[in-house]
Image: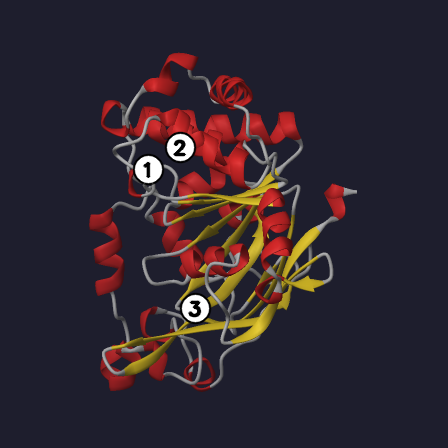
Amino acid sequence: MKENETIAMDRVSVRFTSQGRVVPALDDITTTFRLSELVSVVGESGAGKTTLGRALLGLAKPDSGAVMFRGRNIHRLGKREMKDFRKHVQVVFQDPYDVMNPKHVVLDYLSMPLRFISGVSSRADLRSSCSGLLDQVGLEREFLSKYPHQLSGGQKQRIAIARALATEPDFIVADEPTSMLDASAAAGILNLLRKLAAKRGMGYMIITHNMGVAAYASDRIVVMYSGKVVEDSAADDIVNAPRHPYTSVLISHAPLSQRSERKLLAERDGSDADPDATDPWKLSGCRYFARCPRGTEECRKVFPALSTVPGGGSVACWNPLVNDDGSRVS
């Protein structure tokens, strides 16, 4: 059953070189996503959430670890097997305009996955299928003849979702699908995704820096910081009783604007005690240590493992905000 199928990340690390040093965009990530679930991955810029999504899609190759689907490591699939994988897992990029050829109309854009993945070749069949895709995202067939510059931000994002639906996927990874939209258009996109998920029985992952978006659109939230998962739990539990101090800060700043994100990045409580603490990659312990008011010597020296907690979920924190009995820490 599709409801029980998963994509699993087993100790996945992805490293980049930046200014002469190696930076782990993902550092030893182990987690599982059910194809039928609605999940959000949340964190500031540089948290690793987009790299996680790209690794899950086979677009960023891990330096170590594996991404498993139906018993196979997707990064070792041949072209034919990867083509089959693309039928099941699709992507919606942050700005569809970046992947839409300005010289081509919407019909051409929607036809590509139908041609190369689903094998539709007839012009009449392509037009009919593309019209049906537009109908699913609330757009009229007249949009098939429009060019990208003739579309609003919300319309472009709906067309990007329609393109992802072309292969009838089980799971969609949507990278910041609302960050470039006004509030009304953003709400429309989130409502559309939930409606499509319910109607088609599919799941999705929303990658976002906005905890408000994650809470509204998802049943599960994964919180990332500096390449690590620091909390992973049901959305209601995350919002009502966050365990990790960083999760609490994200909630208090929701919706997280670019201005408030810059303010978050500037908060370095405790950095005077340890010059290396301003650079989380130099810490052997928790990377949030320099900004955490609950940080201890243990936090500075040893990174806490992601551990399950009573009632479900998991947290990587030596001094969580919620006790094992569910009570808030004073």
Residue annotated with mark 2: 109
Q: Position of residue 78 (x, y in %)?
A: 61, 61
Residue annotated with mark 1: 100
Circle 1 sits in a helix, a strand or a loop, which is it? loop
Does residue 139 appear left or right of residue 270 in this picture?
right
If the image is split into quadrants, where does the N terminus sit? top right
Q: Nearer the viewer, mark 3 or mark 1?
A: 1
Which residue appears farthest toward the front when viewing the image?
A: 122
In space, the residues marked 3 and 1 are separated at their CA atoms by: 30 Å
Tag 2 near tag 1, CB within 8 Å: yes
Circle 1: residue type: Met
Residue name at image x 38 percent, y 52 percent: 250
- Answer with mark 3 or mark 2, whichever residue precedes in sequence: 2
Q: Position of residue 69 (x, y in %)?
A: 67, 57
- Answer with mark 2 or mark 1, whichever residue precedes in sequence: 1
Q: Can residue 10 be seen here? A: no
Q: Count neighbours of disc 2 (C-alpha within 10 A) and say few if under 14, some if 14 to 19, many if 20 or more.
A: many
Residue annotated with mark 3: 227
Residue name at image x 53 percent, y 41 percent: 116
Q: Position of residue 305 (x, y in %)?
A: 57, 75
Near-viewer residue (309 or 49)? 49
Circle 2 sits in a helix, a strand or a loop, which is it? helix
The image quarter in which residue 14 lies: bottom left
Near-viewer residue (137 or 257)? 137
296 relative to 266, above or below: below
- Answer with mark 3 or mark 1, whichever residue precedes in sequence: 1
Q: Position of residue 87 (x, y in %)?
A: 61, 43
In space, the residues marked 3 and 2 are separated at their CA atoms by: 34 Å
Circle 2: residue type: Tyr
199 relative to 78, above or below: above
